[in-house]
Image (cartoon, grey):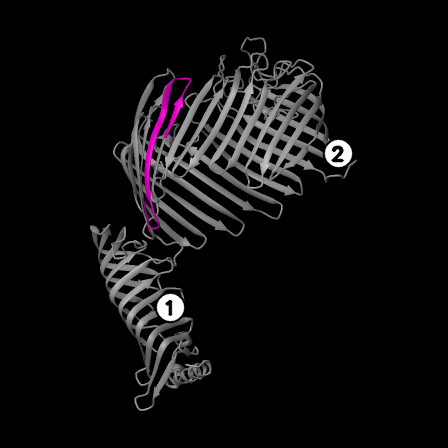
Amino acid sequence: MAPDRRLVSSLVIALLLAMPAKAQESETEPAAETEATDQPVVLSADEVVYDEVLNLVVASGDVEIVQAERTLKADRVTYNQRTEVVTATGNVVLVEPDGEVVFADYAELEDDLAEGFVDNVSLLLLDNSRMIANSGVRRPDGSTEVERAVYSPCDLCEEDPRAAPIWQIRAVRVIHDSENKNVIYRDAFFDFFGFPVFYTPYFSHADPTVERRSGFLFPSFGSNSSVGPFLNSSYYWDISPEQDATARLGITRDAGFILGGEYRRRFENGSLVIDGSVNRSDRTEINDAGQSVTLTDRWRGHLFADARFDLNDHWRAGANIRRASDDTYLEVFDISEEDVLESRIYGEGFYGLSYASLEAFDFQDLRIDAIEQPQIAPWLNYNFVGQPGSVMGGHFFSNASVINLIRDGEITGFREFPTEGVDTKRLSLEAGWQTTKYSDIGFVTDFTTSVRGDLYWSDDLPSDDGSGELRDNVFEGRLYPMAMVTTRYPMVRQYGTFQHLVEPIAALTVAPEIDEPDDIPNNDSVDFEFDEINLFSANPFPGIDRIDDGTRATYGIKTGLYGQDGGYGTFFFGQSYRFTESDNLPEGSGLDDEWSDFVGRLTIVPDAPVALDYRFRIDNESFEARRHELTASAGRPIFRASTTYTFIDGVPDTETPEDREEVQATVSSRFSDYWTATTGIRYDIAESQARDIGFGLTYSDECFLFGVRFVRSYTSDRDREAGDSIYFTLSLKNIGDLPLSGSFF
């Protein structure tokens, strides 16, 4: 058919399908109901025949009809103007406005193509899910009802497309309610690999256009050594577009029921998330005599909450709440691995490069050797940073903080922790100037000078004469001026597709010697770790309570090789020299001698399959290892191995007073397109004992996931018993999605 003739046919058939009688009726119908029928009809075909006697329009050969974003394609289409019925035969394809595609051998539709009957129907949903049925009916309400149907989101086997998919639902009747976006099954069987495994008289799920919907989530089940076999069920509640909630019920053999839930809400200027649980069961604790005591039938639970709100363009406020009923609850039910829970209420402001905050903290220590944690209220901070280059080519900076630490623990003569029972108020003020200079020959030099003053007021502070006498209203202060200059000379050379960097670094820090007063408690500088990160810091301590005084020189060298494909390798090595002695650094810290320990880091990432990161600290005299941290991984999906090795030389009066040596190793293999196996071990070398051994096996394809994870734990902690745990995962696309994890609840 010539193109001009085809165009004339399209115009003629469009006029014939204008349906004036329908338009006349629309005067008495609601506008919403006739909106679709008022849309113009566009038809194209190889041949169009109009029978004036029978009032039939017959289009054949690559027929396409478009009306109101709905498209009908077929080999032959007949329109009866008397009955206002469109009949389509041969390779019928109906594309709905929402993207759903209906395939059929034969179809009888109303003139707006929105309702009718189809035979030997197949549906392709938006997510490529498929439904096949003997026949189907399109209802006036937009729903589709099919008979003897099979539904599956799984791809068909390329070698044998007639083979049953991994899973499917067979039903006597299936209704797709497009208005309510539901797919409803009557008398349905769930088939796996072609075999029926489950029957239900009624089943429904949301269609692919639904992003979220209220309903039951897929259950999880398993077993562990603390609670025995368990089964978890959850219900998701879609409250409104800006809020939702999930209710959870867990059933265990040894710990009874656990009820929990999560509520989430977004506001115009913030968000809120609340998660919690409650349980009534036995628990074990250690009494004052150090004996294990079982407390029967006790209420237990946890509450986690996070809120944040933007008050204006500069300020925001929020809260993070973390509380548990006892120190083993979270571990027993695998809710969280946190061993110190931090609750915080805060307000913070941002002004250019400057920052201000007002905070309050409360801590809950869940560790076996728990120490008394303080309450902090308030903690005020203000950090001012001037505009770069505003003062003599540099900028001023200042920091101010006020903190109040309260401890309610019972005061005794013997203290397991230096600040046990001590209440402290601290005021700290600092001001300084910093600039960076670039020389013509390539040197980059940073100049920093500052002065800081700290004032302390303490109660219940033990006497420094060893008598154990407690003193109140103890006042102490100090002044700490400091100047530091750091220079580096980066040198870069191109070798083919690689860039080679060599950067020597040197620094000089000048400060007076300060004998740390015994009346200044150490609250925020206990967890001291000397490494390559803080080697060039003016004060390597993490907080304010302790300072690294005196004059010292620091050197280091950094080198790296960088490829155009993204691979790289870097190495850093450095050390410092102290001109004056300092009594402020803990023994064994690596900085307490004239020459510091050697610190460094080696990182190699040639490409994605291989990665190595090694951090070290070596004694400057004996060259013995003080700290090793090695993380390495290599391999392809077919076989991939990774390991983490940690060795820390214990330092008294810090968070790691004893030696720690541990190795973790994991091996995984995706030995087929769908199967992945994983095994791992965590081994305590210092104690010559394995902590955990695990194994997992997962099957995953485009529509189905099944996993099993087994863990054997050799560590006991009161309620947490050593033993075996097993977790299962089953996920069906569009039915239930539960990721594989070791979490119980």
Which residues lie in the magenta part? Answer: 680-705
Front residue of 162 and 114: 162
The reply to whether residue 536 is visible in this rendering is no
For the residue labelled by badge 1, is the local secondary structure a helix, a strand or a loop? strand
The reply to whether residue 458 is visible in this rendering is yes
Q: Residue furthest right?
A: 392
Q: Give the labeled residue for mark 1.
A: 95
Residue 256 badge: none
125 within the magenta span: no
Q: Quadrant of the rendered structure where residue 1 is?
A: bottom left
Residue contact at pointers 1 and 2, CB within 8 angstroms? no
For the residue labelled by badge 2, is the local secondary structure a helix, a strand or a loop? strand
Q: Quadrant of the rendered structure where residue 278 is?
A: top left
Vertical comparison of 74 with 460: above or below: below
Front residue of 312 and 627: 627
- Where residue 174 appears, x then y in whole percent? 26, 62
- Where residue 281 appears, x then y in whole percent? 30, 31
- Where residue 624 appears, x then y in whole percent? 53, 14
Q: Residue at x 47, y 19 (%)?
A: 410
Q: Is residue 499 left or right of residue 99?
A: right
Q: Determine crowd level at label 1: few under 14, some 14-19, many 20+ residues with C-alpha closer than 10 A.
A: some
Report the magenta stretch's main SS: strand
Residue type, numbered disc 2 = Lys
Q: Give the labeled residue for mark 2.
A: 437
Residue type, numbered disc 1 = Val
Q: Determine crowd level at label 2: few under 14, some 14-19, many 20+ residues with C-alpha closer than 10 A.
A: some
692 within the magenta span: yes
